[in-house]
Image (cartoon, helix red, strand yellow):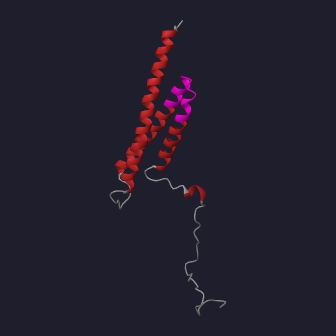
Amino acid sequence: MPGPRSHETAHGWLLAIEILCGLAVWLGVFVLFVNHIEATGFIVPVSEGPHPDTISAYRAWAPVTAAALLVMLVAAFRRRARWLFLGHAITAFVAIAAVLLFAVPSIDFRSLIDPPPVEQSYGPGYEPCYSGSDGCPGG
């Protein structure tokens, strides 16, 4: 049967894991921000889109940030740190926003709201008719 000493040791380990994962989350947010600035050419203009290195960096850091966030929240829950959840909620909001907003290549959120454009198909001999021209049928 575990004694009070083992409970304190587990509590200490969970606290250490929680702190390290919290630091990893904020490091991930910072790296994703810097990577997004580099990919979009905010400082140095980029003409042909994001470099493959910035895409690889995003694909590596986004899951690391999300995993660290999840471990941090689980460790806080296991420690029963109820009041600390407020700070973790802010961290979670910032981290999730960073993963979505600093995506490389950028996520086009308009495609989720706007319907795709419909292409008009006309026959092969179609000539457009502009108002005011004499060759239009019907005026």
Residue visible at 47% across and 24% down? Answer: 15
Q: Residue furthest left?
A: 44
Q: Which residues are magenta?
A: 72-88
87, 120: nearer the viewer: 87
Magenta span main SS:
helix
Question: Which residue is outermost to the bottom?
Answer: 134
- Nearest the viewer among 139 and 61 is 61
As drawn, is 18 to the left or to the right of 51?
A: right
Residue plotted at (53% across, 31% down): 73
Of all residues, the one furthest to the right in this rendering is 138
Q: Is residue 122 magenta?
A: no
Determine whether 41 is above or below 28 in the image: below
Residue 83 in the image, given as x and y percentages of width and height: 57, 29
Q: Is residue 86 above or below residue 52?
A: above
Quarter of the image with the C terminus is bottom right
Q: Quadrant of the N terminus?
A: top right
- Spot occupied by residue 102 in the image (x, y as percentages of width and height): 45, 49
